[in-house]
Image (cartoon, rainbow, N blue to C red):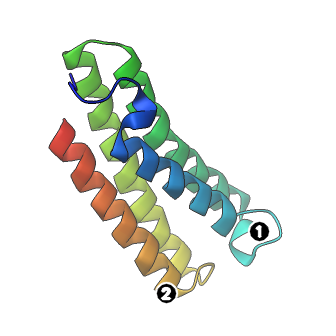
Amino acid sequence: MNDFAKQFEDLRIWQDARIQAVSLYRDFGIGMPSGSDFGCRDQIQRSGVSVMNNIAEGFERHRAAEFAHLLTIAKGSCGEVRSMLYLAEDLQSLAPEVAHSRRERARQLSKGIESLA
């Protein structure tokens, strides 16, 4: 597994995933223009939370194979976040520059997850 991290909170990818999840909750919160579509809001928020939770769960399993498997799931959820950001942009629920910034952050997170898997 990871010789440097003693707990999942020490992992940079988990910290970045946490920031991403909070950003998604803020961007798609109730009262925001992007928050009016419940289906879209629910899906992107759940995907964002899935990234951080799968990293945490995998780390806590204390088995390299299980950690790698859950990192793969986290990376998939990160891709789902990026996909949903395109939809939000296309529906004009999120400004293009915000959607682009969030997608770029998600791409970087995905690369970080892949480098650890």
Type of amino acid at the residue the image marks with label 1: Ser
Q: Residue at x 20, y 18 (%)?
A: 64
Q: Few, some or many C-alpha atoms within 10 Å of disc 2 (few <14, some 14-19, many ≥20)?
A: some
Is residue 116 toward the left or the right of residue 82 in the image? left
Q: Residue at x 26, y 45 (%)?
A: 113
The residue nearer to you, when weighing 82 against 101, is: 101
Type of amino acid at the residue the image marks with label 2: Pro
Q: Secondary structure at mark 1?
A: loop
Q: Few, some or many C-alpha atoms within 10 Å of disc 1 (few <14, some 14-19, many ≥20)?
A: some
| Quadrant in which residue 100 is drawn | bottom left
Q: CA distance from mark 2 to mark 1?
A: 18 Å
Q: Is residue 63 above or below residue 43?
A: above
Residue 52: x, y in percent? 47, 40
Q: Which residue is mark 1?
A: 36
Residue 70, label in figure: none
Q: Residue at x 37, y 61 (%)?
A: 106
The nearer-to-camera label among 2 and 1 is 2
Image quarter where the C terminus lies is top left
Residue 85: x, y in percent? 48, 69
Residue 50: x, y in percent? 49, 39
Q: Which residue is mark 2?
A: 96
The residue nearer to you, when weighing 13 against 40, is: 13
| Quadrant in which residue 114 is drawn | top left
| Quadrant in which residue 32 is drawn | bottom right
Residue 116: x, y in percent? 20, 39
Q: Secondary structure at mark 2?
A: helix
